[in-house]
Image (tube, rainbow, N blue to C red):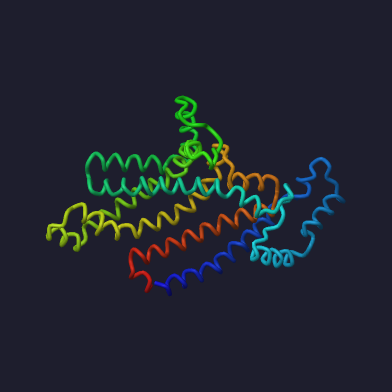
Amino acid sequence: MGTYIARRALLVIPLVWAVVTLVFVVVHLVPGNPAAVLLGPFATGAREKILLQEWGLTRPLWVQYLTYLRNVATGNFGVSYLTGEPAATQILQLFPYSFELALAAMIIAVGVGTPLGILAARHQGTAFDHGALVVAMLLVSVPDFFLGLVLLLVFSSALGWLPPIGDGAFSQPLSLLAHTVMPATALSSGLMAYIARMTRTSMLGALREDYIRTARAKGVAPTTIVYRHALRNAMVPVLSIVGIGAGQVIGGAVVIEIVFARPGLGTLLVNSVTGRDYIQVQACVIVLACIFVVINLIVDVLYAVLDPRIQYA
């Protein structure tokens, strides 16, 4: 197990380097002049040149790249062009809001999708099974931002049960929960449907295995067969969906935060792209990409926990 985890962890290093390099290249290929955006109507050639020199954007590209790698390796993402604050400071301020939203979405997706898939597999061919599949297909087909708008229209505008926008306060759990329910539900809808469908398919396959027939022949309780024997093997492919879905949640949070006017890394990233704030864009994308890489590393480790044979692959 230790060797497997170490090998997977070492693979993270070149992956992160590739992400960091790709972000640097893409950001510098984006048309536009951040100095002109910042100066606005007061922009002149001389003023733009002064700002570009101050930011180090007049140096050769390879020098900028090496400096960029050194700074990122030490956790220094530079200073935002628009605010004059360290990019890392803004990320640290807004990260808790994005983390809370993403965590709530993942809990809803896994906590609802997995039991729904298990129940659909146990009642294969029944009205419940068909209804679950129809709901899953609808959720996969509906964009999360559209579902968010529907939730706003119904539960905030029509019924007045939940606040429409904002994030609440961490010191007030009930307010935080009220502001998180709708955006987290909208963000988790597609992933929840995928998890439900994959869990159903995996459970049906596991329940047809020989060891399940043997357990039934020995008189093992149906609940024990499903939740102790079949579920563990069925969860291995489901973990793949969860790992991929983490990226979907991270990417979808950008849109959901805008729809619900929530602070977070998604809103910061959009504002930075609009303002041509290269430093802040690079910092946001790198942090989001590293989070995705870490989540997939955790999923790889969980593979080995669920199926010890994987560690020898």
Asked if residue 79 lies left or right of residue 220, the reply is right
Residue furthest to the top in view is 158
Q: Quadrant of the N terminus?
A: bottom left
Residue at 36%, 65% (x, y): give it.
305
Locate residue 233, reporting x and y percent.
29, 60
| Left or right of 243 on screen, residue 117 | left
Residue at x 84% of width, y 42% of height: 42
When the figure is inspected, residue 140 is found, relative to residue 311, above or below; the finding is: above
Residue at the (22%, 44%) spot, across then down: 125
At a point 74% along the width and 67% down the height, the residue shown is 63
The location of residue 275, given as percent across then percent down, is 70, 45
Is 145 above or below relative to 310? above
Q: Position of residue 89 (x, y in %)?
A: 66, 52
In the rendered image, the residue lying farthest to the right is 46
What is the residue that sits farthest to the front in this orientation?
A: 171
Pick the residue in front: 89 or 256.
89
Total numbered circles: 0
Where is residue 287? Give x, y as percent. 58, 56
Instruction: Classify residue 134 by image quadrant.
Output: top left
Relative to residue 206, is residue 178 depicted above or below? above
Q: Quarter of the image containing the C terminus?
A: bottom left
Q: Nearer the viewer, residue 140 or 288?
A: 288
User: 132 or 185, which is in the foreground?
Assistant: 185
